[in-house]
Amino acid sequence: METVLSGIRPTGNLHIGNYYGAVTSFVRLQEEYKCFFFIADWHSLTTHPKPEDIRRSTRTILAEYLACGIDPQKSTIYIQSDVKEVLELYLYLNMNAYLGELERVTSFKEKARKQPDNVNAGLLTYPTLMAADILIHRANKVPVGKDQEQNMEMARLYANRFNNKYGKEYFPIPQSFSLVGQGVKIPGLDGSGKMGKSEGNCIYLCEEPSSIRKKVMRAVTDAGPQALNSEKPEVIQNLFTLLSVVSPKETYDYFDEKWNDMTLRYGDLKKQLAEDLINTLAPIRERILDFSSDTERLDRIALEGAEKAHESAAKTIRDVREIIGFRV
Ligand code: TRP
C-alpha cells in the first residue's frame, strides 16, 4: 500500500478553504492509503513563536483535524517534535544539501526579505527538514498546493542524491499529489481569488454563527445583474460557489434563476448563504469545541500517534545508519 504524508504548520485555525480544499480529501485518503498527518511545529520555529503560542496552536490544529474526521485509528496523526528521528535524518540530508541551491529557493528569498533581522539557518534549511519529514516514512505521495512545489522538488533532489550516493534505491521519490479536482477551491469573501488566512477573508471552521453572519453580509458584491442571463462577475460567482458547496441544489438553482431574470437581491442570497454555512459547520464546530475542551484526551491522542510515527521512523533511521556506515 502506498504511503501518503501531509504536514501543516500550526498557525491559527482551519478555515473552510482548508476544509473543502484539502481536509475532506485527507479524510477520504485514509481509506486507500497508509496516511501520516503531522503538525510541523519545528518548522514554525523559524519565526520564533512564544512557547504558549506553540502549545495552543498545536492543540488547536489537532482538535480541528480530529473534528473533521481524521481518524487516529486509520491514520497516524502526530506532532513533528515528538518524533526525534526526523532530526537525525535532517542532519544526514543537510550534509548533502548545498548552500547555493538552498539560497535559490524562492520562499527562502522571500522570508529573508521579510525578516532581514532573522535570516537563520533553520530558514535556509527549511527544505531539508521538510524532506526529512517526508523521507522518514519513505512516503510516496504528498498532497501539497502550488506554493510547496519547490520544496517538493528539493525533497526529490535529496532523495535522489542519497540513493545515488550510496548506490541504493532506498528512498522512494516522493510525488506531489495534487488535490485539484478532488478538493474544491473556496474563494474569499472579499471578491479576491482564494480564501486564505493572510488575506483576512476567511470563515473559520470554529467560527461563531453571529460572526459568520457578519462576515457574509459584508462580502463584496456589485451593482447587480445588468442583463438577462449574463455571466456572473467574479465577486458574485464566488458567492455562488460557496452556495454550491454548503446549500442544497434547489437553493442554488433558486438564486441562479433570480440572477438570470435579474430579480436577485444580494441581501437575500447572503442571508441564506450565512444560514447554510452555519448549519453545515455546526456539527464540525461542536466537535472542535468538544475536542478542545479536553486537552488530556488531545495529549493522549498525540502521544499514541507519536508512538506509531516513531516506530516507522526508527526503522528508517536504522536502515539509513547502516547504509551510511554507522553502528545500528
Ligand atoms: N511546508 C509546508 C507548508 O508550509 C508544511 C510542511 C512541513 C510539510 N513539512 C512538510 C508539508 C512535509 C508536506 C510534507 O505548508
Image (spheres, helix red, strand yellow):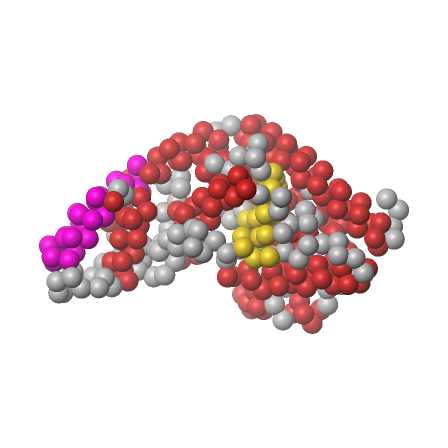
- Is residue 298 visible in the rendered structure shown here? yes
Residue 144 forms part of the magenta stretch: no
Depth order, front residue of 168/283 = 168
Residue 313, placed above or below residue 303: below
Quadrant of the rendered image containing residue 90: bottom right
The quadrant of the picture occupied by the N terminus is top right
Q: Nearer the viewer, residue 162 or 3?
A: 3
Q: Is residue 294 above or below residue 120?
A: above
The secondary structure making up most of the magenta span is helix
Magenta segment range?
250-279
Q: Nearer the viewer, residue 309 or 292?
A: 309
207 over 301 or under it: above or below: below
User: Which quarter shows the C terminus?
Assistant: top right
- Location of residue 181 (image quadrant): bottom left
Task: Give coordinates of residue 145: x percent, y percent.
Answer: 50, 57
Horizontal and vertical percent for residue 128? 68, 58
**What residue do we see at 26% from left, 42% from top?**
248
At 75% across and 54% down in the image, what residue appears?
170
- Across and down, in percent, residue 186 comes to 37, 53
Q: Is residue 95 left or right of residue 185?
A: right
- In x, y percent, where is residue 182? 44, 51
Left or right of 195? Residue 8 is right
Compared across the picture, whether 308 is left or right of 262 comes to right
Residue at position x 61%, y 68% from top? Answer: 105
Q: Is residue 275 magenta?
A: yes
Residue 112 in sight in this render: no
Residue appearing at x 52%, y 61% in the figure? 147
Q: Say which quarter of the image contains residue 208.
A: top left
74 vs 274, nearest the viewer = 74
